[in-house]
Image: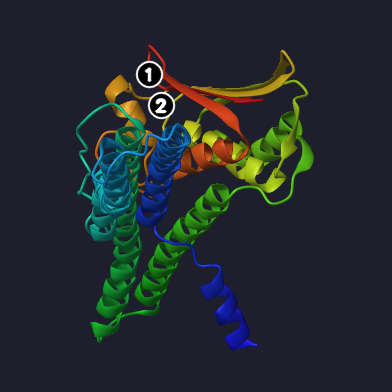
Amino acid sequence: MTGRAGRARHHLRRPSLRAQLTTLYAGLVLAVVVPMLLLAGFLVGREQVRVRAGDAVPPPGTATQQVDAALAIIAITVVVLTVPIAWWLAGRFLRPLRAMTVTAQEISATNLNRRLGLRGPDDELTKLGRTLDDLFERLDSSFAAQRHFVANASHELRTPLAGQRTVLQVALADPDASEASLRAACEEALGLGERQERLIDALLTLAEGQKGIERWEAADLADVTKGVMLSRRAEAVRRAVTVKTSLDPAPISGDPDLLASMIGNLVDNALHHNVPDGHVIIATELTSGCARLSVGNTGPTIRSQDLRRLFQPFQRLGTQRTHTTDGHGLGLVIVQAVAEAHGAQLTAHPRPGGGLDVTILFG
């Protein structure tokens, strides 16, 4: 069975593109030249018959015989030269394609800085080269972002682990440690462990959002938001932040769990990055047949040049990395991933007096 499949694959193997082009070029030339030579030979033969019919047989070596010899030489020359010339033309035509193949083979995940850089007329091969260069550029950016993400995630996970080890080592190294100090050390270690759990949960949610939606269900943004706000009410009171809601029905199709995570991260971001006696405004509505969710909050001033950075993993307002208990810099990244998974359009604008307005429009 295996041998039969191997023979079938061998039988179906196509010749190289250069061989195909050579056959095409040679066939076209021979299809034009050979009939012309045959026609010329036929006409010469016809003339010979006409001359003999008139009892005027030309002697050997006449012009007619010379023409026959010349046609034979031309035919042989055309047949002999057509194939190598066609092979050379096909190779010259495919030279940019071979250069693209060699460069693409040299490119790997650790060497994505190579580019084709094809120059020449603006033909199909040049356009293909530019398209591949754009693809390599996107791949290079994607792999760089992935390496940066892995490095940051490792750093975020290692920090609480190191903290836990330090706390436990200090407690165990103290020969006079009391029950109260050991209990305090254990509670601090538990707190660091909870921080790790929150980070892992955030990473899993981000992975689910980037994977896409496998099962679509009917949901209402207003109902999902109400459930999220019930679980954040105590946090809002603790932070002395006033929450104002305007939740009109906004039915959509999607993943309710991912939607709840998206809204929860938006609300958490609005609560954590706020000011004393600040406020959060949350609204859902149906606009022109599209569900719309908006979350705005007071807070520190956000510069326009910093806005895009806040939607990148492990980036926080103010400094690139600040170790706080409020989050790991993944909230807005999760929001963006879930919005993209639902085909929604996300827009964010800094508020003039400080804070951020985020709007998500579901088509």
**Nearer the viewer's eye, disc 2 or disc 1?**
1
Q: Toward the viewer: 22 or 102? A: 22
Q: Is mark 2 on a helix, strand or loop?
A: loop
Residue located at (38% from left, 13% from top): 353
Q: Toward the viewer: 152 or 160? A: 152
Q: In this view, does 53 lie above or below 94?
A: above
Q: Position of residue 65 (x, y in %)?
A: 30, 43
Question: Mark 2 and mark 1: span between their CA atoms?
Answer: 9 Å
For the residue carrying disc 1, how many other residues have a C-alpha within 10 Å: few (<14), some (14-19), or many (20+)?
some
Residue 181 visible (yes or no):
yes
Q: Name the residue under label 1.
A: 354
Identify the mark at residue 275; answer none if there is no mark: 2
Q: Where is residue 120 in the image (x, y as percent from the top left)?
A: 21, 31
Residue located at (36% from left, 33% from top): 124
Q: Where is residue 177 in the image (x, y as percent from the top left)?
A: 30, 81
In the picture, measured across the screen, residue 248 lies left or right of residue 317, that is right
Which corner quadrant of the image does residue 7 belong to? bottom right
Q: Is residue 61 above or below residue 173?
A: above
**Mark 1: which amino acid?**
Gly
Q: Is mark 1 on a helix, strand or loop?
A: loop
